[in-house]
Amino acid sequence: MKNARKLLALVIAVVMCVALAAPAFAYEGPDWEAIDAMDHDEASETIYDVVLGEFGEAYAAAKEETGATRMAMMALAEAKLVESGAFLPIYTQGGNYAMSRVVPRSNAATTLWGLDEYRYHTLLVTNEIITAEDRTNLLALWNEAESADEYHEEAELYLTGKGYTFSDTYVESSPYNVNIWDTIATSYTSDSMFVSGTYDNLLEYDCKGVQQPGLAESYEVSDDGTVYTFHIRQGVKWVDQQGSEIGEVTADDWVASMEHLLDNADALGYLLTNTDGCGLKGFTDYLNGDITDFNEVGVKAVDDYTLEYTLEAPFAPFVTMLGYACFAPMNRDFYRSQGGTFSCEGEEYTPGDYGKTPANIAYCGPYLITNYTAQNTTKYEANPTYWNAEAVTTPNLVYSYNDGSDVLRSYNEAKEGTISGAGINSSALELMKTDTATSVDGTEGTYFDLYAYVSPGTGTTYCGWWNVNRGTWANFDNPDVGVSPKTEDDIARYREAIVNQHFRLALCEAIDRGSYNAQSVGDELKYARLRNSYTPGTFGFLAEEVTVDINGESVTFPAGTSFGEIEQAQIDADGVALKVWDPEGDSGAGSGDGFDGWYSPENAMAELDQAIADLAEVGVEVSPENPIYVDYPYGSYNETSTKMANSLKQSVEEALEGNVIINLIAFDKDTDEESATYRFSDGTEANFDLSTGSGWGPDYGDAQSYLDTIQMYGYMCKNLGLF
């Protein structure tokens, strides 16, 4: 997040035809000499306008609307986004075979935004692997239950009657490395999920997807929709890692949190700005330096137990944002005891030791972290002072680190009960179909026959990102790692090609995502978790009939129309050969997942032919004798990652008939791969031409939570080499 927005420094005339008809004018391409004279942000703005300008205009218009019209126009803007080919939606989490001891939907896992899905204290976990048949019956109970409490009771009765016993421990296999324990100062899920159980939110989603009182017992909204007043639960204690009391939760904890957030606005501050988030009063102006008095920012402790947030304008999804870490409380006195300071109080900002280890944070949530060993184990125990202790159904939580180098480890550990469950990769699937077991009711069969189920998808969309403004050809934190084999001429030719829309679409349509996915989950499920758009097609449905303009024609969509159906209408009107919505998907309910609406060697070559003609106009020959080289990093330490990388290389080079060559850049350490593709601070540090190492899940219940990340200066633009 930048401290100031900049005006576009240069307007470049570039003709980008979406259809495959011959261009009316000669292709010119960007003025690279002018771009090279700019600083990084100015160059990024210029290249953004070339690559994503049409989306930017459509999205800005959508954000001016309200209600159902807003949703429909956001879907039209998303169509322009996917048509750009700037990145390729690939898959969502889930969609693979799994087996588990966790009772399905016993926590807030169905909530697609925020961090409540990682709050595991309400999980129900059995000592025995739950059969696929019993999972189906439990999901039926969930559908019938009128409340979370009712579902928990019915699930326990059902499983006890079937002979299951319950465990007090949930163990999850995790591939993540924790960088910081200060949840307010990070935007990485890989950090936040480890901290989310150590504090409570103002409101929290239950397992039925209903927001319930948390640290706020109640709240009111002003008549004009801009002031939210929360009444803080009294008597909630802050404790240290040892469980010793250090204070009481008060309204000031959210004021201190906001002060700290403003000192770390590059982490989660975008959620509160006028352009990217809810528009908290004064937040953007304070961030930009237009105001210097923190009292003008819209967060206020009216008294010890009354907290007030004020927005610049009404923002209906505001309360859906409260599960995210930018609304986490922070104990001011403990923060100061760790050497932390606040710049808004006239001090030079430093976090001191706050967040360095689990001992350097305060706790007011269901768990205390009792042990942490990097790349090994993180253990949690129930907080004995927790205000809602009776709601903690699983008092022990463990994250067990697994870098994926042993492709059978998770399967074997799930069988043994070392971990509570596992997704099943293609290697383990073969064993699962032959290994025999006896279920809790005495039924004999293979692990696959007894226990395999297809895990549900989530709101997170993982993508293939094209670096349209690459600035480094080795890792930013270690120049001896991830070194590109490309020559200066290769670099210049890629640079010219990747800003051409037809070239990007050719690349996107040349990737056989089914084959790529099969290397992880097997041929049977290779399409199950494929996602065809950035915002899931079922993320929203029209609350009322809406008429919008699509290419000069008024089109009416009835109430109940999905986001994906509207998006597809714009794509079809633009004549682009992409399918992001299948009205017959999900057993006729309609879906944007579960099929490959992009891969087509025929369409890819048609797009490439147009790109070759365009690039010839600017002196760039593209042929099998002079191909464009694309660097793609992968984890050579991981067998599945290696197979996926080779699958991608094969499909692109075959579909594009040797005109594009994928350079596979091997990383033998996951930390080095993360530096290249995931843990970098801005676009200048992105060490790839193509990366599949990052995705986005929503922060709140509105499509803006996705699309804001790709607007100019949006958070995920760094994956495009921008900003």
Image (cartoon, rainbow, N blue to C red):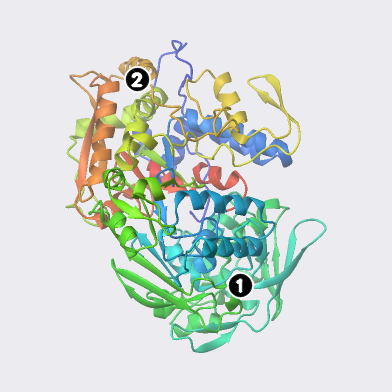
Residue on which disc 2 sits: 601
Give percent across and percent down for residue 530.
43, 36
Q: Residue at x 55, y 24 (%)?
A: 571
The one nearer the camera, 649 or 205, is 205
Foreground label between 2 and 1: 2
Asked if residue 645 is positioned above or below residue 246 in the image, the reply reads above
What is the number of the mark on residue 504?
none
Task: Provide residue 268's location: percent of width, then percent of height.
Answer: 51, 59
- Cβ–Cβ below 8 Å for labels 2 and 1? no
- Which residue is found at the position 64% from the left and 80% from the top? 250
Instruction: Specify whether residue 296 is in view.
Output: yes
The kind of residue tagged 2 is Pro
Where is residue 499 shown, x and y percent of the image?
A: 38, 30
Report which quarter residue 623 is drawn in. top left
Residue 697 in sight: no
**Closest to the observer, 21 or 28:** 21
Q: Please indicate whether residue 14 sits to the left or right of residue 68 in the image.
A: left
Q: Which residue is mark 1?
A: 254
| In the rendered image, the vertical position of residue 682 relative to residue 306, given as above or below | above
Q: Position of residue 388 (x, y in %)?
A: 61, 76
* Badge 1 density bin: few <14, some 14–19, many ≥20, Cα 10 Å: many
Which one is in front, 250 or 51?
250
State the SS at label 1: helix
Towards the viewer: 222 or 310: 222
Q: Residue at x 33, y 34 (%)?
A: 523
Q: Is residue 126 left or right of residue 547?
A: left
Residue beneath the point at 68% across and 38% down: 70
Number of marks drawn: 2
| Picture quadrant where residue 27 is located | top left
Mark 2 is surrounded, within 10 Å at the Cα level, by few (under 14), some (14 to 19) or many (20 or more) other residues, namely: many
Q: Is residue 325 left or right of residue 475?
A: right
Relative to 416, say whether 722 is above or below.
above
